[in-house]
Image (cartoon, rainbow, N blue to C red):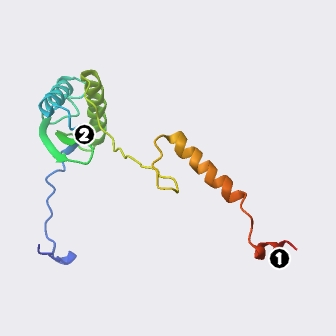
Amino acid sequence: GTVWHVPNGEIARVGNYSQLWSKAVVDIEVGYGTDVRVAMGIMQQVANELWDDPEWGGDELSEAPTVFGIQSLGASGVGLRLAVKTEPSMQWSVEREIRLRLKEAFDAAGIEIPFPQQTTWLRDDSGHSATTLSEAEQAAFRALHEEQHAPRPEEDFEEDR
C-alpha cells in the first residue's frame, strides 16, 4: 500500500474515536476434536453472565460481549474470538476475568484447551529407534561412558608431562 508522510507542522486536527472506550479481545483455542458450535455457545453463555454480573456489566462493560466465532486454524487447535467494548483502560481486567470464566466453563464441559505438542524420535548410533526413554537414556549413558574411558591420543600425554 501507499505510505503517507505528514510533517508535524501540517497536522491541524487529530481525532480519537476510542477515547471514551476500549475493547477487550479474548482469543482462545479449542482442540480440533471439539464441537466448535458447543464451545462458542459456552463462550456466549460466559459473556452473557459477565454482562449480567452487577460487578462487571454495569460499570466495566459498555456493550454486551460478542462471540465472533472461528478466528484461526492453528497448529494445535481452532482459535475462537470474543470481544467486548469496555470503559477506558478496563480492557485488561475484563480480558483476565473472561479468560478465568472461560477456563472454568470449558473445564466443566470437558473442553480441552490445547497446547503445542511435539513427537521426538531417538536413534542410537546403529540407526535403531529407541522405543522407550529408558532405552534412550541407557544408550546415552553408554555413549558417555565409552567417551570418558576411551584411550587418549598420544599428543594429550605430552601435555601431562
Towards the viewer: 93 or 143: 143
Q: What element carries label 2?
A: strand
Q: Which residue is drawn at 59% across and 44% down?
A: 138
- Separation of residues labelled 2 and 1 (CA atoms): 64 Å
Percent across and percent down for residue 101 are 27, 28
Would you name the residue on which mark 1 appears? Answer: 158
For marks 2 and 1, the one nearer the N-term is: 2
Q: Is residue 12 above or below residue 122?
A: below
Q: In the rendered view, does 33 fall on the left or right side of 116?
A: left
The circle on residue 111 is: none
**Residue drawn at the location 53% of the way across and 46% of the way down:** 136
Q: Mark 2 points at which residue?
A: 28
Q: In which quarter of the image is residue 150?
A: bottom right
Q: What element carries label 1?
A: helix
Task: Report the amino acid beneath label 1.
Answer: Glu
Instruction: Classify the position of the N terminus by image quarter.
Output: bottom left
> For the residue carrying disc 1, how many other residues have a C-alpha within 10 Å: few (<14), some (14-19), or many (20+)?
few
Q: Which of 102 and 49 is in front in this view?
A: 102
x, y percent for residue 88? 23, 44
Q: Nearer the viewer's eye, disc 2 or disc 1?
A: 1
Image height of 46 relative to 118, above or below: above
What's under tag 2, amino acid-wise?
Ile
Residue nearer the viewer, 29 or 13 = 29
Q: Quadrant of residue 109?
A: top left
Residue at figure coordinates x 14%, y 70% from the top left: 12
x, y percent for residue 103? 29, 30
